[in-house]
Image (cartoon, rainbow, N blue to C red):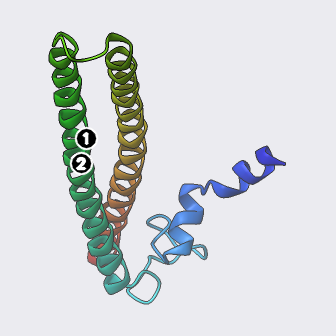
Amino acid sequence: MFLAYEDRSKMTSDEYKKAFRLPADSKAQNGDVLDSATAPKANCESALAIALDIRKFEIELYWKRATYFWSFLAVTLAGYFGLLVAKDLPSTRQGEALLTVSCVSCLGVVFSVAWYFVNRASKFWQENWEKHVDLLEDARELGRSTRRS
C-alpha cells in the first residue's frame, strides 16, 4: 500500500509542466509552434516568482531553526559545565550531581539528533524548491525561444 502511494506521489517532468500549463517542448502536439495562448508568459513568470519566494522563505526558516538549536545547545552546554563545577563542591551530594549531569548530557544528545533531522528536512525542501525554480526557468526560456521563432 505504501509503495503504491509513493509511486503516485511522484510527478514526471511532463506531468509537472502540464499541471502548471508550461510548454512541454518546442513543438505542440499537432506540430504547430507553441504560441502565447498555449504557454502563457504570465503564468510561468508568476509561478517562478512564487517558487523563488518560497525558496528564499525556506532558507530563512533554516537559519531561524539553526539559531534556536544553537541556543538550546549553548544552554545545555552551559548547564553541563555548571553542574560539573557544582559536583566538586563539598555541599553537593555526589549521586544527585551525577544523575543531573547525565540528564543534561542526554538532553544535549536529543537536541543534537533533532537538529540533524531538522537540517535534513530543511535541505529536502530547499532542494525541492530549487528544482521547481530550475524547471520554471527552463520553461520560461523555452517559451521565449518559441515566441521568437
Residue positioned 32% across, 82% down in the render: 41
Q: Amino acid at mark 1?
A: Phe
**Which disc, if any, is residue 26?**
none
Left/right placement of residue 53 relative to residue 25 reads: left
Judged from the image, the secondary structure of the residue bearing numbered disc 1 is helix
Q: Quadrant of residue 114?
A: top left
Residue 18 locus on image (x, y percent): 56, 72
Residue 22 visible within the image: yes
Please determine whether, in this image, residue 8 is positioned above or below residue 49. above
Residue 149 appears in the picture as rendered: no
Of residues 122 and 86, the one nearer the viewer is 86
Whether the residues at callouts 2 and 1 have beta carbons within 8 Å, the answer is yes
Q: Nearer the viewer, residue 149 or 89?
A: 89
Q: Relative to 145, does residue 59 appear above or below in the rendering?
A: above
Q: Position of residue 137 (x, y in %)?
A: 30, 62
Question: In the image, what residue type sits under mark 2?
Answer: Tyr
Foreground mark, 2 or 1? 1
